[in-house]
Image: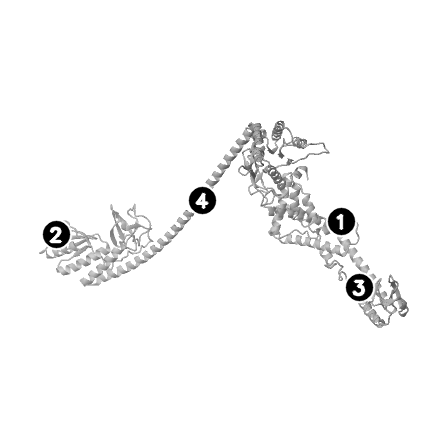
Amino acid sequence: MDSSTGRLEFGKVLESVAAGTHSHAGRSRVMALEPGWTRERSSELARETLDAVSLISLGMGVPAAGLDELIGICDQLEDGALVLEPRQLRDAGEALSLQRSFADLLAARSEETGDLSGLAGYLERVSVVPGIGTHLVSLTTPDGELSPAATREYERLTRRVEDLKRKLSSRIGRISSSLSGGGVLRDMPPTIRDGRYVLPVVSSRKGDVRGIVHDRSESGETVFIEPAELVEDGNALREASLDLDYERRRILREATMDLRRVLPLVLGSVDAVAGLDAVYARAVYHQRTGSVFPEEGRLCLRDLGHPLIRSDEMVRNTIELPEDWRVLIVSGPNAGGKSVLLKSVGLSVACAHSGLGCLAGPGSSMPFFGRLHVSIGDQQSIFQHQSTYSARLQEQLEMMRAPGDGSLALIDEPSAGTDPLTGAALAASVLERLAGSGCRVIVTTHQGQLKSLAQGREGFYSGSMNFRKETLEPDYTFVAGMPGSSFTLEIARRMEFPVEVLSRAQELAGDSFRLDRLLEEVTSARKELCEGIELLQEETERSREQVARRVRELEEEKREFQKNRDRMIEELAGLGRDINSRADSLLGRLARTESREERKQLREKIREISARMETPGWNGCRGEESAEGLREGDWVGVIGWSGPGRIEEVGEDHVTVTMGNLRLRKSTDQVTRVEPPDEKPPSAGWSCPVDAETELDLRGLSADEALVELDRAVEEGLAAGIPFIRVIHGKGKGILMKAVIDSVRSDRRIGSFRPGLPSEGGIGVTIIYPGRGGGKV
């Protein structure tokens, strides 16, 4: 780790990442991670992390179990080990089998995993040795012993040894029972010495037991004798045990050789899995912290945080600078968060270039930095005879000597530890030099000369850390575009410095103090303005929500209105059909009856129907289109008529409509434009049950008979909508003429009447116009 990332405590970030590994090898890879200072390496590390995130989301964990043990076994083989123990073979077999299963799973789910080119260098090397892991596992037991079924010969010899042991144990048990109670044996069971079954015999009675002495107790009071009758079976057991041990060593030696033959491939798989363990740990960190990989562009770190601060204590800040940014000067009080902000920016660069992602929000971007310079903290050295300020100057000198283009320099308090005036002047010169070389710089300071450096210089910008004057406590938020006060005297006042000391300090500070007061006032005004803007935004948002809610309510009311309107139209249409049907029935009866009283009753019912249809709001047959702008040839619907008609003539306030064989004269408010009918238009309803005549000849009838016929003609004329009826009553004695005129004058169904013109028959004819009225001449 280089000195710059070390000053940022990048190693502690890596320790947090390493906690997600499953092996010491993976942890070592994480702790050795270095940022990629080229676009290619940085993109490669980011792609690895994102591909690992994809595998984690599919439930495919890293096959790192047993990796450390496998690495130790490989080290022994490289050192020349000829025979590995069963426990080691078991560990190697299980680790390699797990890696092989991972490789097989990847192949089986290749369509789901998609493009994993970022991990190709690792995945293509994982357990490319088929069968070796399964073979080693089959030779051993879970508790780390050689399996009795490792080979047929080993299985046979194992059974032979076990059979002989059972036989010897049974026989010596019988011999011991036969000698017990005679004082020959010690009060203890038979045992085994050097692989031979022996009896614990009292030394003074050893002559009572024939056999071979194999051992003696430390006190000499007990000798361990193998009975003579067991010697032959004991020899057989010894030979079988030797054969079994030889077969065991042969199996282990061959298994070790099998593993040694594929050692280069195993080492490749081990290296790949260790690398994957580290990459998976980066992916877990990326998911756990919600880090992002910024796009390349201007510096815009949204909701930037410090990865070593707990999330519940962290204050996130947004740093957004224009394209021409070269130097950002951050000021503010002590312990206000300036250094933390500086480190947050530096760690965001280092982490983004290391495949970890920076702790910032979506939409973040930053220029690509190919080099990072950091001057933070106290680097004094007694051995190198460097003071704090000398160490800072050495770091700044190295920055100026290094290529500047594409690099980022982070400098904390460049003039601390020396004369403020000359130190600030030197720092300003250094900043100008770095900016001119193409380096981007973020610097923190308390010096008023440096705070004002951003004024009038292209690419130089100011910022500050906010401070609550009312509590004299920092809130660690970054304020762009505004230098900040150090609040030196205010903090001293809170610590209860003597008033006279503070007053004298204020006098001695002079212009510097007034500048701080000015900055304080500007900061306070800016805060009030921001709070006002926030309140205005909140009020605007509330108003927008209220408008949106009202719009939704109106839309709902509109939908309900349209629903009710459609239902009413349907109900009225059904009512219209019922009325049409009743009117047809009444007209039919009217045409057939001869009774004057019944005809009068029928006419009253028809008037009721007509009055009902002319009730305000009735639109049983109306469409939604206005009747304005009617022209000859337009198709219209007529109130009280079920079919469409065509306009033949258009008057000032009326139209003449042809409906089938009928011509109707209607006012414009009784018709509505409709869509043209099909080829055969439906017949008009109320369909008149009789032919409505426009001429009625009453000559030769009595007055009573004539009035009956006149009543019928008027009724039919009204039903048919004919414009007039020419009634012929003749001159004669004037009796019939008088009866007709008196009836017409009192008949409210007749709008008007007049005597006929000479061309129409003169006074022997009366022209009547059916319609609402009172028989006007």
Query: Could you tell me which secondary element the residue under label 3 belongs to?
Result: helix
Look at the image and tell me whether residue 453 can be seen.
no
Which residue is disc 2 drawn over?
Answer: 763
Query: Could you tell me which secondary element the residue under label 2 belongs to?
Result: helix
Q: Give the image location of residue 214, x and y in percent.
A: 87, 63
* Mark 1 Cα shell of 10 Å, populated few (<14), some (14-19), many (≥20): few
Circle nearer the N terminus (1, 4): 1
Q: Amino acid at mark 3?
A: Leu
Colouring rule applied to residues: one colour
Which residue is disc 3 drawn over?
Answer: 157
Q: Image point 39% across, 51% down: which residue?
A: 559
Residue 604's disc is none
Of tags 3 and 2, the one toward the viewer is: 3
Which residue is disc 1 drawn over?
Answer: 75
Which residue is disc 4 drawn over?
Answer: 542
* Mark 3 Cα shell of 10 Å, populated few (<14), some (14-19), many (≥20): many
On screen, residue 683 versus residue 232, left or right, reads left
Please report contact status of discs 1 and 4: CB closer than 8 Å, yes or no. Answer: no
**Mark 1 to mark 3: distance in Å?**
33 Å
Q: Quadrant of the N terminus?
A: top right
